[in-house]
Image (tube, grey):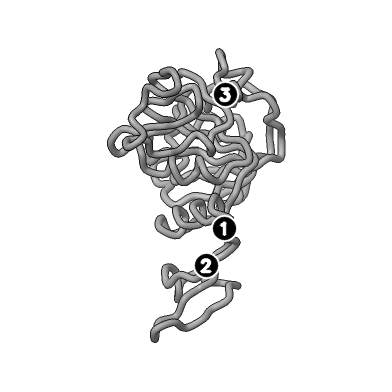
């Protein structure tokens, strides 16, 4: 069996570079891979495209990367609690693609499932639909949305095993399972790391096939 366990975060982040696209699980500050983000904030990698439901707060989560101006573009749904994000967006320093929350979730899930695009009614008649193909289904207008993938996906789980199987706890589950599927390399930060076989298969939320690297954070 492939050894997916990394003893430290620096090794687990081997290969991250400037100009890459990263996905980050989490909703608000719940379920974010905070230790991974803190390590990324120490690296000299810039011009990143970051896909995340939110942009953290000024001094925590993705706010740390924004503070160092490591992010070139944010693809997000909710960004209302980060003053630095607001400043950079209004000044034109940061490119922002705001997406309806359900569409963001489905675009990540589609990317992980090998589905290139799908139609959704969400966003029709708004700025979200500008420049996108429109079709009518069942008497309702739908817009074409493309799937999302990333060079690296960073997720946070409550418990994981050495084979990469993950269990999330409560609302911290949120975007994590979807984004774990959509990364070329998925790094899982877990609170508890157990031997393979210790997790009840019926309770596993993300199978280890989607996880390439795992560490205890």
Instruction: Say whether residue 30 is visible.
Output: no
Nearest the eye: 148 or 41: 148
What is the quadrant of residue 114 in the picture? bottom right
Q: Could you tell me which quadrant the N terminus lies in?
A: top right
Looking at the image, which residue sits at the far bottom? 139
Q: Which residue is mark 2?
A: 118
> Would you call the spot at circle 1 few (<14 residues within 10 Å), some (14-19), or many (20 or more)?
many
Answer few, some or many: residues within 10 Å of disc 2's Cα (few below 14, many 20 plus, some between 14 and 19): some
Is residue 114 shown above or below 40? below
Cβ atoms at labels 1 and 3 below 8 Å apart: no
Dot 3 or dot 2: first in sequence order is 3
Q: Position of residue 112 (x, y in %)?
A: 54, 50
Q: Position of residue 196 (x, y in %)?
A: 45, 22
- Indicate left or right for 138 with 69 as reference: left
User: Where residue 88 sits: x, y (%)?
Assistant: 56, 44
Q: Which residue is drawn at the image coordinates 55% and 30% (left, top)?
A: 187
Residue at image mark 3: 4
At horizontal 42% and vertical 44% (from top left) the residue drawn is 175
Q: Is residue 14 visible?
A: yes
Q: Which residue is mark 1?
A: 147
SS type, badge 1: loop
Residue at image coords 41%, 18%:
194
Foreground pick, 92 / 123: 123
């Amino acid at each position: 069996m492939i050894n997916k366990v990394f003893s430290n975060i620096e090794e687990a982040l081997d290969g991250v570079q400037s100009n890459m696209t990263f996905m980050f699980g989490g909703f608000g500050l719940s379920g974010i891979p905070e230790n991974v983000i803190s390590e990324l904030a120490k690296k000299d990698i810039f011009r990143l495209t970051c896909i995340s439901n939110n942009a953290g707060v000024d001094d925590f989560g993705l706010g740390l990367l924004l503070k160092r101006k490591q992010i070139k573009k944010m693809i997000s749904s909710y960004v209302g609690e980060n003053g630095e994000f607001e400043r950079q967006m209004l000044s034109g320093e940061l490119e922002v693609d705001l997406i309806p929350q359900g569409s963001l979730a489905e675009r990540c899930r589609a990317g992980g499932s090998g589905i290139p695009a799908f139609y959704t009614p969400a966003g029709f008649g708004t700025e979200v639909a500008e420049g996108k193909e429109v079709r009518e289904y069942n008497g309702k207008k739908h817009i074409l949305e493309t799937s999302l993938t990333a060079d690296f996906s960073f997720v946070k789980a409550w418990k994981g095993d050495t084979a990469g199987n993950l269990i999330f706890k409560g609302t911290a589950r949120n975007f994590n399972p979807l984004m774990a599927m959509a990364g070329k390399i998925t790094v899982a930060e877990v609170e508890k790391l157990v031997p393979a076989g210790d997790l009840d298969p019926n309770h596993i939320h993300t199978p280890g096939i989607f996880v390439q690297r795992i560490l205890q954070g």
